[in-house]
Image: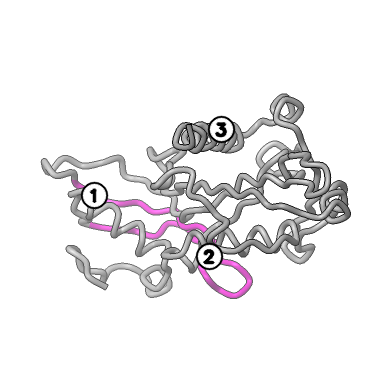
Amino acid sequence: MDSKTPLGDEPERLRQAPKYRAWRKSVEKNGCVIKKVELLQDLNKGDGSLLFALLRTRVEDPQGRPLPAYALIRGHAALIVTEVVNRETGEKKFLMLRQRRIGHGGDALEFPAGMLDEDVADPLGVALKELKEETGLDARRDQMVPLLERPLYSSAGLDDEAIFYFGCSLDLPSDEFHALEGGEKGKSDENEYIRLGLWEYEKALPEVDSIQVWLGFSLWFEHQRRVAAKRA
């Protein structure tokens, strides 16, 4: 790996983690210099790959001033705003998921999404995989539209996670369209229990407590506006 800063002081398991290397690359690309990294705590998945890492760092900005010392490495994620269209009736709804979240213990209404983990260079590929795993829908790469050309950070004061926002509109036969309502997905071995539902925007929004979902809707409608303007 090309790096401005030697990696000798870091644990091997950290140096080998793609999401950690991606964080280093981003920090250095932005003109900062990594002087020291200390691994305070790491959490790993069942296969041994890095899930999260809490670091104490010495990072200097381009003027040589230190940045705040702590960084939480989570890695980036992909989110898919998914519209499904009933081929027979033309009815359009958003395909959304309900799952209980540890952050507040409640049911969250969300779009399909997932962490890039090892696939840090292929957010679109991860988006397709997560859509399939969480909803059962197969989409092609050319059906996925980046809603923004770059990922957006939610809490860069501590957390390295940024989200790539994609959108897709899938035309489905009526029986497949209706089968999505009330379907169940998820991986019980990962404590993931997902319930599918079809939602109109106006009815979904009052149920949403995630800024990611609000932003997903906003980016989707802005994309639709741009498409309509080009056609006009």
Q: Nearer the viewer, residue 90 or 83?
A: 90
Q: Which residues are magenta?
A: 36-60
Mark 3 or mark 2, earlier in chain: 2
The amino acid type of the residue labelled 1 equals: Val
- Horizontal placement of 169 versus 52: left or right? right
Rendering coords of residue 232 (x, y %): 48, 31
Instruction: Measuring from the top left, give residue 71's x and y in whole percent.
Output: 39, 48
Image position, residue 68 (x, y; %):
30, 40
Is residue 40 rendered magenta in the image? Answer: yes
Q: CA distance from mark 3 to mark 1?
A: 39 Å
Q: What secondary structure is marked by label 2?
A: helix
Task: Pick the quarter of the image with the N terminus.
Answer: bottom left
Are the residues flagged by discs 3 and 2 in contact, CB closer than 8 Å?
no
Is the magenta region chiefly helix, strand or loop? strand
Checking the image for residue 221, the label placed there is: 3
Mark 2 and mark 1 lie on one chain; the one further toward the N terminus is: 1
Q: Residue at x 61, y 44 (%)?
A: 81
* Numbered disc 3: secondary structure: helix
Where is mark 2, residue-wise? 125
Q: Tag 3: residue type?
A: Phe
Indicate whether 49 appears above or below 209: below
**Which of the two marks, 3 or 1, is nearer to us in this view?**
3
Q: Which residue does the image show at 80% across and 48% down from the upper left?
A: 196
Q: Disc 2 and disc 1: Cα gap in Å?
A: 32 Å
**Badge 1 is on which residue?**
59
